[in-house]
Amino acid sequence: MSKKISIVLICLICFAVIGCGKKGVGKGKVVATIDGEPIYVSDVNNALELNVKRDPMFRVTPETLDTQLAILIDRRLLIKEAKKRELDQKETFIKTIQTFWEQTLIRDLMAAEDRKLNESVAVSTEEVRDYYDKLSHERTFGIIKSRNREVVDEAMKKNPDEVIWDEEIGPLSYEDVNSAVLFMAFDIPKGQARVIMDRDLYYLIYVKDVVDAEVPSFDEAKEKIEERIRNLGKQRAFNSWVGAVRADADVKINSDVLHTLEYSRE
């Protein structure tokens, strides 16, 4: 492609951006055709925006436009060739497209919900102080989890030294906790246990040990703690929202089939 064509393309892109600002987003002018199939200025714009996101140093020049348009043309040609061979009818292709579509929808939904939560989640001074106080100790937990409440109740009756724990976690600082269950269990005194339910699982949490930990001054840690609490608040609010969505839906789980899958993977 000549330099003259590239300069014309730059002008078209500029006019397209100005036009979109005044009249709304549209397809824009056609910059090339492949067997009658158009490539619009908006297609080039989208590709250029992607390049800028990947590389903030990327600049639009006649040379980079030549390259980008050539890539778009080659991509369309390869897609047309794949369609000729009916590769787009293969089950693997259809599943891949469906997965990508679902992931994109979920990502966009989560981004929209995150924007709402940013406006609604506030952090109080008391929350920051409480969080800071919990940083002064690290805890080691013994954990049993089961869908059957009787399993954890039976373990609760035993001497903790005789219990075969599913897992042992720690020493763990409050800052390193990323489980809603352990957040709820972090104030359990050493040598004591508690049963906690989260979704469909029952947890027996036993505090095996508590040790002192070094922490920075409150003033040094305050800003980081506020951000951490805000993110945790958003996470809890999001999980609560997902739980409400699930509660409104008619969800049925076939436990017999689920257990068959579990045993087949052992």
Image (cartoon, rainbow, N blue to C red):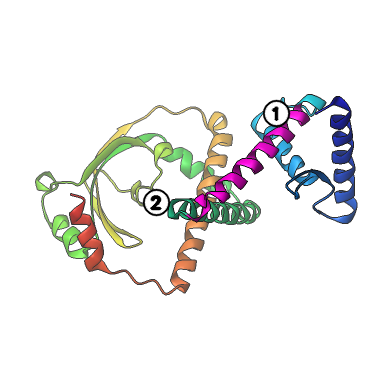
Amino acid, disc 1: Pro
Q: Which residue is mark 1?
A: 56
Q: Which mark is residue 180?
A: 2
In the depicted view, which residue is nearer to us: 105 or 243?
105
Q: Looking at the rendering, in which quadrant would you find the N terminus?
A: top right
160 or 61, nearer to the observer: 61
Secondary element under disc 2, as helix, strand or loop, is: helix
Q: Nearer the viewer, mark 1 or mark 2?
A: 1
One can see residue 216 in this view: yes
Q: Position of residue 217 (x, y in %)?
A: 51, 28
SS state under label 1: loop
User: Which mark is first along the chain, 2 or 1?
Assistant: 1
Whether residue 50 is visible to the viewer of this picture, yes or no, is no
Segment tinted magenta in the rendering: 64-89
Q: Position of residue 254 (x, y in %)?
A: 28, 69
Residue type at the position of mark 2? Ala
Q: Is residue 212 above or below residue 94?
A: above
Tell me residue 35's x, y (percent): 73, 47
Please tell me the numbered disc located at residue 141.
none
Front residue of this view, candidates 86 and 46: 86
Q: Residue at x 60, y 51 (%)?
A: 111
197 lies left or right of 159: right
Image quadrant of residue 69?
top right
Q: Is residue 147 left or right of residue 67?
A: left
For image coordinates 88% across by 55% down, the residue present is 23
